[in-house]
Amino acid sequence: MKLWGGRFKEGTNALLDQFNASIGFDYKLFAEDIEGSIAHGKMMCKIGVLTEEELAQIITGLRTLQGEIEAGTAPLTLENEDIHMNIEALLVEKIGPLGKKLHTGRSRNDQVALDFRLYTMRKTETIMAKITVLLETLYEIAGSGVEVIMPGYTHLQRAQPVRLAFHMMAYFQMFKRDYARFADALERMDVLPLGSGAMSGVNYPTDRMYLKELLGFSEVSDNAMDAVSDRDFAIEFQSAASILMMHLSRFSEELILWSSTEFKFIEISDQFTTGSSIMPQKKNPDAAELVRGKTGRVYGNLMALLTVMKGLPLAYNKDMQEDKEGLFDTVETVEICLDIFSEMLKDTEFLADNMRKAVEKGFLNATDLADYLVHKGLSFRDCHAIAGKITAYCIEKDSTIEALSLEELKQFSEAFEADVYAAIDIETVIENKASYGSTSRKSVLESLEKANAFLKTL
Ligand code: ARG
């Protein structure tokens, strides 16, 4: 008979058994389930529902079981539906009828809310640690790329010269926000739902403050109905994960472009590239492509859970069992993507000479040419037009602006003087960026210092 089978005359249809069971995936929550059960047992002992002797037996039983599940020797069955009932049934097998006492003052609803929340909290911490590794990696690369000059792009057209460090630090900011998003979600997650019962509280003078301490939560939920039906933490986690993947995907796209023959800005190591089965010359950036591709499933998991939760009446509904697989998949995906990405970056060579050469083509100093004329007293609109005409002239002549003679420049404006060459020199162009947060050496060094201070707080 099912653990809940008291009021049933007939057994369930085998199809429903299969359909209803979540043990196929929620076995992943076994450690959290056992931890929650031990805390619940201790609390029930504290309020006199279990004796010390009974508690000791229950804890020993649960710990033995934990070892067996870890070793893969515990017989988890579909008949027992989910990890919560499997553990309970196995405990009864192990320590006898006493095992049945453990569920006093508890519902599977507050039990699963606790387990899933604890799991998500732990994974949030793991992911934050992995983001830290990525931030440190980026900081290193940026640190050695202060003097490396490359084209910055808008519309994927060469726009203005920047330092490699500056480009890398743009990603640093993105992942720093990701870290903060997970940290923020974690703070809101950190609320104990256990002790809420099925939905309205429990008929025992449970000590939820004690449970909170045992399980290391910062707060206790204020409303039992909300506690058992809230999955915001899983949604927030998946939103943060989706934004993180979006960032990783954008970065991947750049690495893929940069490793192409067209760019040749980087060389991803053999370890993180693969060959083609037919074209011997190929070296493909599969790792970056997979990270970009896997972003799709992480978005999908977020959308799935938002859709599951949409329109659910309070409190617990079985629909909510669908909260887990997507989150598990997101956890696995994000973990491996972060690991791969940091390792791949560490193993990537940045081809400074090619980056520098790319700056020479594309008239990246045209804006500065216009600004030069502004300093000579012309209006910016006129200067923009003059610089545009000079660019067109250069394209026709297959020249660069700095290669034109002063006489040629003077054909476009009398305001040009010999000092124009210094003004449009790439180094000058970069160093003229005077605004806070710019690509000038001073700004980049400042941002590196700030990043270093931030990393020390992690
Ligand atoms: N396996 C269920 C889930 O994941 C546990 C909660 C079941 N509660 C219930 N009242 N049937 O959501």
Image (cartoon, helix red, strand yellow):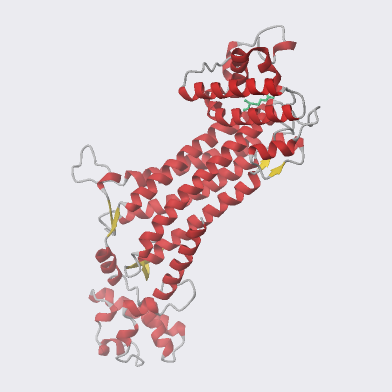
Q: In this view, does 18 lie to the left or right of 449?
A: right
In-image side of 200 versus 130 (left or right): right
Q: How many labels does the image show?
A: 0
Name the side, left or right, on which 316 lies relative to 414: right
Q: Which of 40 and 432 is in front in this view?
A: 40
Q: Which of 272 and 416 is in front in this view?
A: 272
Q: Residue furthest front?
A: 53
Above or below for 314 versus 390: above
Residue 383 image offset from top left, x and y in percent: 41, 84
Name the residue rendered at 28%, 73% in the picture: 395
Give percent across and percent down for residue 61. 59, 20
In which of the image's four quarters is ligand 1 placed?
top right
* Residue nearer the viewer, 32 or 403: 32
Asked whether 408 or 50 is in front, the reply is 50
Residue 322, above or below 123: above
Query: Do we see residue 235 in this rendering?
Result: yes
Residue 20 makes an appearance in the image? no
Q: Which residue is drawn at 30% across and 85% down?
A: 421
**Residue 365's spot in the image, x, y percent?**
35, 76
Residue 355 image point, x, y percent: 29, 65
Q: Identify the residue at image location x=43%, y=66%.
A: 448
Picture quarter containing residue 229? top right
Displayed quadrant of residue 170:
bottom left
The image quadrant where one finds the N terminus is: top right
The furthest residue to the top: 9
